[in-house]
Image (cartoon, coloured by chain):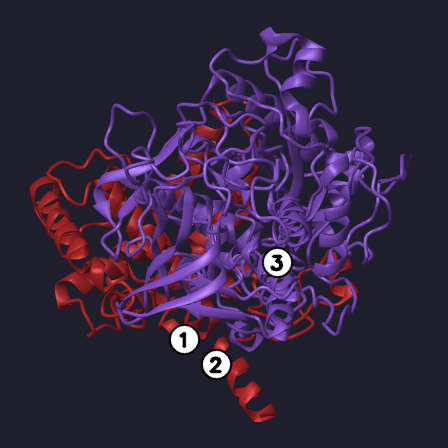
Chain colours: A purple, B red
Amino acid sequence: MATEKTDVVIVGVGAAGGILAAELGKAGMKVIGLERGPRLKTADFSPHDELRYFQRQDLRPNVKRQPVTWRPNANVRANPLPILNYGNQAGGGTVHYGTLSWRFHEDDFRARSHTIEKYGASAIPADSSLADWPLTYADLEPFYDRAEYELGVSGKAGNLQGRKIDGGNVFEAPRRREYPLPALLADQSGVLFEAGARKLGYHPFSSPRAILSEPYKDRSGCTYCGFCQSFGCHVGAKSSILVTKLPEADATGNFKLLTGTMCYRVNSDNSGRATGVSYYGPDGSDNTIEAEIVILTPFIYDNTRLLLLSKTEKFPNGLANSSGQVGKHLMAHMMPHVFAAFDDRFVNVYMGPSAQKHSLDDFNADNFDHGGLGFIRGSQVSVGPADLEAGPIGTAISMNPPPGIPKWGAAYRDFLAKYFARYASIVAQTENLAYADQTIDLDPQVRDQWGMQAPRLTYDWRRPNELARVEFLLRKMEELGRAMGATHVWRAPLGPGAPGAHHEGGTRMGNDPKTSVVNRYGQSWDIPNLFVIGSSTFPSMSGFNPTLTIQAVTYMSADAIVNRYKKNPGPLV
Amino acid sequence: MTKHDAARRAFLVRAAVGAGAVAGAGLIPDANAQNSEQHKQTSAPASAHQHSSGSEHGAFFNHDDAATIAAFTERLMPGSPDMPGASEAGVLNYIDLALSGAYADLQDFYRRGLAQLDAYCRKTYNGPFQRLSAAQQDEVIAALEEGKATGFTWPTAMEFFNTIRTHTMEGMFADPLYGGNKDFAGWRLVGFPGAQAMFTPIDLQSKQAFTRAPMVGLQAIASSQTRKG
């Protein structure tokens, strides 16, 4: 059993932890990062292998060794989820993610107030815990800018300091300057989507992505090979934490990364102070780190799980949980989609950066009038392959054939043979509302490889507001498919109630210690030297992928820790 | 097999048309294509397990189970003279190797699933799966898919169907390194060029099938990297 001392310990070195490692290290703080997976390098990501990385999820947690269970409601037993969509290595999810890099809209940060102002309080479902953020877009804008420029994001501005620019996202909040890199080239699915959306009067654009469209900061530009979602980038063009912030953290000389380590408890005394963490080493050893500051930045399940597992006499319901809010308000995107297949041409959707390639924002947030629609908030809409990844295994498993064609046999074979290279998928990404009874807690029956209780999700997206939104979007996407000139347009079946992508919530940020776990800087209200940073703190989720906002919030927290907390430790709010 | 496929297609066309303006109706290959395929197939072997090319096994399955999996997967992805199916792609070999390696934790799932399948077939058709006619095999598979096959506890009929279907797709389309997709049979079927290192702006603008570069597998890529040093 080893014990060591440091200024800062970071649990989980991914989208948020990697930034903190570099920024705090640069400020002269001694930082130890705990990472349960390995540290891989660009050379590890060639050649691309769909079976290994997409189908067998090599860059994601093993569902048998690190189970996460799910149940639709509290009356039934939870079963392990078959797929876990987060990272399991240094760099976290940024290693294998689809790289979509959005700034949330101004009204995303005040969705509750905005909805009440425009539609009245009765428009919000009575059981929803939709809440405003304790910060505004304007607060975050400098940090969005920093994240885009430091990491490398490609895109085209649609709103430069209030000036709307056609070809970019005209619904985006005002930005101070252009993206650091021009937008990625459109593939044929993007070209078709662009034309179809224009025909319908919408405002399509090449999705902003953390992929270099040109060489930048001594890194190579994208080769359009198509292996992004689920894969590491073989040329390092994906702006993952592995190739951006970890080298910066290394260069400070103040950062030490411990891979193969699993943090199992945040240690605290009963004076309201965290004293460090305990973790299992790769050899099974039981170790302790004593630190002045403890920062939790794993995927959202482990934030909640660690706090619940670290209960003390002072915090019998979980560390930093005097509010009782730890584990509540779990949110996730649903991704209903429509297939568009073409008899008269190839689309070759497997080319070019995968995931959500070309987008429109006309149906996101409150960018359209929700009056009389029966739901609030919206969804990003984009085009791409069937399961965000475009190889034939993923396509065969995720592209349901249209009604009338079975999933096997000669007719299926002929369908797949004909349309594999002649289809595109139009996908929505819905802003599901927060509900207090959508939760993360500890599974009483299932344990992981370390003997820790598995995170248990209680969640069912099929609420009236969400179902009405999905139906609205499916119709819009069918119209889009037809406007794209597709010969055949059909809906994919909707999944069960399990949470989809981009899980958020569990350690909500807010202005009031009674109703939130952390403040706007991710600092625990109860324990000022404990920070929880990542999408677990998001009070609402928007229809956008969360990573760039996680990173902007992280830069803001790093800035507050370096410039304020370091000089004067204590509550930042 | 041939007649059944044609009959199945005809049924599906009727079903699709009968359902109204269903998007899928037009996706059924046209009648001429069916007829020509039917014509070519009349001289083809009558059932899947007679294809010798896909019967490689030895890592996990015993002989009877291998014959069952070969026949089952060939019904899921049937070959034709124009199109490679599961046997030609070596799907059995893929699953056999996977169950002795990466999917070793599914060995009992397969053993029990195969035993339940065998019991169901003997009870319902008086014979093991691989000896049934193609039409009967399709009935069995449909009964599994719909959860209507009796006598299944664990795995359930639907679980067993879904797993074999998933593994069939993996065997069709995973890199040949893993023992299926023999000679890129699956990639040739759908027109996937493998993991190309790059696509050019001209590739991205093309409305045609990609033919600029040959299909490339993992071992070829790895050895070219080795040569580069």
**Residue A69 point in image, percent of width and height:** 31, 41
* Nearer the observer, A52 or A454: A454
**Residue A222 point in image, percent of width and height:** 71, 66
| Amino acid under disc 1 | Leu
| Amino acid under disc 3 | Ile
| Amino acid under disc 2 | Gln
The answer to whether residue A484 is visible is no
Marked residue chain, label 2: B
Q: Secondary structure at mark 1?
A: helix
How far apart in space, not on screen, are marks 2 and 3 (Cα)? Answer: 36 Å
Marked residue chain, label 1: B
Please name the residue that numbered disc 3 is placed on: A19
Circle 1 residues within 10 Å: few <14, some 14–19, many ≥20: few
Q: Are marks 1 and 3 in contact (CB under 8 Å)?
A: no
Q: Quadrant of the C terminus of chain A?
A: top right
Please name the residue that numbered disc 1 is placed on: B177
Q: Secondary structure at mark 2?
A: helix
Q: Quadrant of the N terminus of chain A?
A: bottom left
Q: Are marks 2 and 1 in contact (CB under 8 Å)?
A: yes
Is residue A411 shown above or below B183?
above
Q: Which mark is residue A338?
A: none
Residue shown at 29% from the left, 39% from the top: A442
Q: Which mark is residue B219?
A: 2
How far apart in space, not on screen, are marks 1 and 3 (Cα)? Answer: 38 Å
* Nearer the observer, A45 or A48: A45
**Residue B58 point in image, percent of width and height:** 19, 74
